[in-house]
Amino acid sequence: MRVYIEKNAQDLGAIAGDAAAQHIREAIARQGTANIILATGTSQFETLKQLIKAPGIAWDKVVMFHLDEYINIAASHKASFRKYLTELFLDKLPPLKAAHLINGETDPTAECERLNKLIDKHPIDVALIGIGENCHLAFNDPPADFETTDPYIIIYKLDEDCKQQQMNEGWFASLDEVPAQAISMSVRQIMKSKNIICSVPDLRKAKAVKNCLEKPISNLYPATILSSHQSCCLFLETLSASLLSNDASHYKMTANYEG
């Protein structure tokens, strides 16, 4: 895993978005299509802005999956990840080859089966992800399941810290409004991606970043597993990197992404 620390969230998004665009262009040049995973949440705003305006991407050759969605949340709800990706990504681009959004309003078991069959036919070239305040990946809260090989799984009880983060980001007015369950891409499926672009801005993520980089790999700190991926870039900025210890100074690679 390579780590880049930029001055602010805007710079982070610019370099992370360009890195993702580079992987997408290379996949299309190599095999005629690119299969991607997109995350949601405030951490992805700047990265997606940059990706949308990146030059030279044949979007009609891109197949998109996304990480997670609440169970029993309407697509019109402001916290819906389908709504997020539709309004902030899909509506701003020419039509993609395919966009496989998670429907949290249907039977979750059947929806996982549908998505699992689809993604099995589309090896992922690049995954754009983030890290939660509790160090989760997607909705794989600690202790995360590192063993399941199912691409999409049902999370039957979201962690209270996870729910608190969703409320603090403004998606819900109270903790009681945050859904208790979700459909999530599994850790193993995320790790099967050929390339991972992980964007983590903001001071409130600093503890999670510290745990990700300084704890041994453990399902109690799910994001620690990223260090074992052969092509993962973690993009931070000054605030989210502010708790890294002196021993972690070798991670501080503020530089332009070189692929």
Image (cartoon, rainbow, N blue to C red):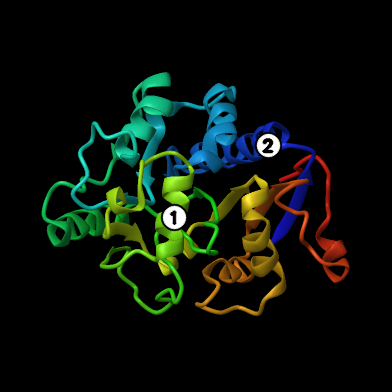
Give the residue number, with chain letter if any, for mark 1. 164
| Residue 206 visible in rendering | yes
| Residue 93 visible in rendering | no
Question: Of residues 232 and 73, which is closer to you in this image?
Answer: 73
Q: x, y (%) of residue 74?
A: 20, 39
Q: Residues within 10 Å of mark 2 (few under 14, many from 20)?
A: many
Residue at image location 63% in from the left, 57% down from the top: 232
- Against 49, residue 135 (above or below) is below
| Residue type highlighted by circle 2 | Ala
Q: x, y (%) of residue 226?
A: 59, 65
Q: Splitting the image into 4 quarters, where does residue 160 fall? A: bottom left
Element at badge 1?
helix
Front: mark 2 or 1: 1
Question: Of residues 122 and 185, which is closer to you in this image?
Answer: 185
Residue at image location 68% in from the left, 49% down from the top: 203
Give the residue number, with chain letter if any, for mark 2. 9
| Residue type highlighted by circle 1 | Gln
Element at badge 2?
helix
Gap in angstroms between the C-alphas marked 2 and 1: 22 Å
- Against 160, residue 171 (above or below) is above
Q: Which of disc 1 and disc 2 is earlier in sequence?
A: 2
